[in-house]
């Protein structure tokens, strides 16, 4: 599994001069967007500019590339051009995927994050999430609510969020909650972060640098939580018992898995503690 991106930040691929400012926000991944941020008239020039940028850069910040839908000419052109620079981004973010057959177009060397934004994609999550190349699922709340005829409120999309988290967990892949679209409402963003984390999401996407700190603060484990997780994993690995007690807390396999996920979120490899 590639490292959990706790707060991937969208950057329009036709605004590559925004990348340095985006990096300064401390987002742990950038989503360079070839789809909704770019008009049809700009797509060819933007695609070529992005390839040139990727060809000339060392990958010191993880890039996720959101391409156009695979069932469109623009999506196929994106794939064709990006196939030359697959070492310079960590995954493709693929919008509006509904069936596994669509992924047959993607080079086998590419990791994939699926953008789940149609009712059929929600229906087919069990199948989509099980594909070996799929590293994560991302909820596209704006498109999904438009398709459903609902609003983007938490309750309206709760079923879709729950199902996405369920199948991400079953397949041990990460889950990215939909961006919060109102960039000047930090309290509401914080509230939604708390709900998303409580539901089981490992990440939440950002659409503005000002959202990054709030998202990371709410999703990343604290120093105390990291210390606790390391201690629990070390003691459990050194025991031959299925259940142990650490500082008065019962520890079994489900607790161990929870601690492992906390350390992955914080950038640690749990296997190194065994």
Image (cartoon, rainbow, N blue to C red):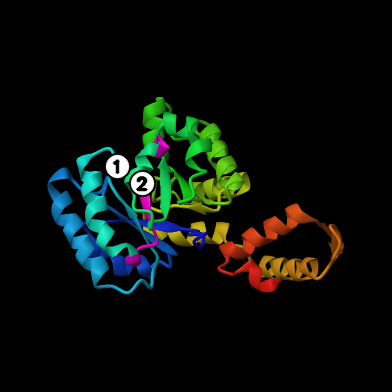
On residue 31, the disc is: none
Examine the rendering and report whether any part of residue 42 can be seen: yes
Examine the rendering and report whether any part of residue 151 can be seen: no
Mark 2, other Cα within 10 Å: few <14 / some 14–19 / many ≥20 = many
Disc 1 to disc 2: CB gap under 8 Å: yes
Q: Which residue is mark 1?
A: 70
Q: Secondary structure at mark 1?
A: loop
On residue 94, the disc is: 2
Mark 1, other Cα within 10 Å: few <14 / some 14–19 / many ≥20 = many
Residue at (29% x, 49% y) in the render: 67
Please name whichever residue, 168 or 33, is drawn nearer the observer in this view of the structure.
Answer: 168
Please name whichever residue, 168 or 28, is drawn nearer the observer in this view of the structure.
Answer: 168
Is label 1 or label 2 in front?
Answer: 1
Horizontal relation, residue 204 to residue 182: left or right: right
Mark sitting earlier along the chain (1/2): 1
Q: Split into 4 quadrants, where in the image is the C terminus? A: bottom right
- Magenta residues (range): 87-100
Residue at (35% x, 39% y) in the render: 102
Look at the image and say whether residue 271 sits in the magenta stretch: no
Q: Position of residue 242 (x, y in %)?
A: 84, 57
Q: Quadrant of residue 115?
A: top left
Residue at (29% x, 66% y) in the render: 19
Q: Position of residue 144 (x, y in %)?
A: 40, 34
Look at the image and say whether residue 95 sits in the magenta stretch: yes
Horizontal relation, residue 49 to residue 125: left or right: left
Q: Give the spatial CA distance, label 1 vs label 2.
A: 8 Å
Q: Is residue 45 above or below residue 166?
A: below
> Farthest residue toward the top?
149
Q: Position of residue 253 (x, y in %)?
A: 76, 55
């Amino acid at each position: 599994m590639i490292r959990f991106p706790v707060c991937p930040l969208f950057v329009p691929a036709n605004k590559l001069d925004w990348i340095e400012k985006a990096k300064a926000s401390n987002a742990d991944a950038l989503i360079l967007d070839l789809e909704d941020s770019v008009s049809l008239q700009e797509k060819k020039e933007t695609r070529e500019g992005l390839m040139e940028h990727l060809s000339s850069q060392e990958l010191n910040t993880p890039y996720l590339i959101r391409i156009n839908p695979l069932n469109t000419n623009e999506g196929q052109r994106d794939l064709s051009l990006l196939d030359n620079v697959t070492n310079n981004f960590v995954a493709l973010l693929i919008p509006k995927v509904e069936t596994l057959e669509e992924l047959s177009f993607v080079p086998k060397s590419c990791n994939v994050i699926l953008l789940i934004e149609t009712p059929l994609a929600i229906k087919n999550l069990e199948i989509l999430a099980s594909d070996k190349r799929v590293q994560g699922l991302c909820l596209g709340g704006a498109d999904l609510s438009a398709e459903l005829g609902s609003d983007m409120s938490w309750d309206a999309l709760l079923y879709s969020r729950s199902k996405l988290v369920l199948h991400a967990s079953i397949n041990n892949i990460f889950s990215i909650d939909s961006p919060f679209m109102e960039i000047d409402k930090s309290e509401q963003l914080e509230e939604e972060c708390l709900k998303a984390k409580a539901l089981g999401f490992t990440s939440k996407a950002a659409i503005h640098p000002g959202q990054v700190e709030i998202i990371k603060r709410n999703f990343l484990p604290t120093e105390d939580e990291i210390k606790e997780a390391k201690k629990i994993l070390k003691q459990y690995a050194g025991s031959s018992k299925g259940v142990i007690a650490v500082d008065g807390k019962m520890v079994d396999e489900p607790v161990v898995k929870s601690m492992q996920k906390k350390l992955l979120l914080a950038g640690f490899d749990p296997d190194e503690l065994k």
